[in-house]
Image (spheres, rainbow, N blue to C red):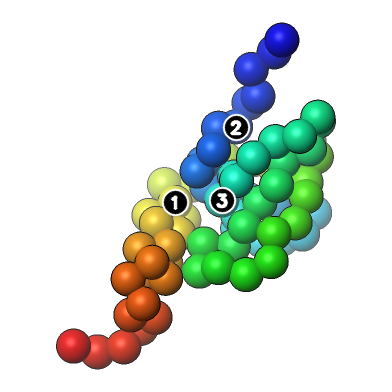
Amino acid sequence: MQDPAFKRHDVVLGVRAERIGIVMDNVGPCYQLRPPAGGPEWEAEPQHIEPAPAEVQMSARVAEANRDSGLRGERW
């Protein structure tokens, strides 16, 4: 069995959807992606996603942390 090119929690660019997503899983040839700040998942084929640049990955991780903390941009 071949390892998937992207692993769970990788931040990727969905080229066709023009969206940033976090890899949640892969089933068959497709990946299930979720927006960093939450929202509905979508599927993408491997040829339609690519690794996100470092600055996009960092921004996505901050959005994910904010979502998990419940802050969502609120000030202290």
Rendering coords of residue 70 (x, y %): 36, 77
Q: CA distance from mark 1 to mark 2?
A: 14 Å
Q: On screen, 38 above or below 51?
A: below
- Three-letter residue code for mark 3: Ile
- Three-letter residue code for mark 2: Phe
Rendering coords of residue 67 (x, y %): 42, 70
Q: CA distance from mark 1 to mark 3?
A: 9 Å
Q: Which mark is residue 57?
A: 1
- Observer-side mark, 1 or 2, equals 2
Quick one: label 2 or label 3, which is nearer the N terminus?
Answer: 2
Q: Name the element at disc 3.
A: strand
Pick the front one: 66 or 54? 66
Give the residue drawn at x 63%, y 26%. 5
Q: Which mark is residue 22?
A: 3
Rendering coords of residue 12 (x, y %): 59, 46
Quick one: label 1 or label 2, which is nearer the N terminus?
Answer: 2
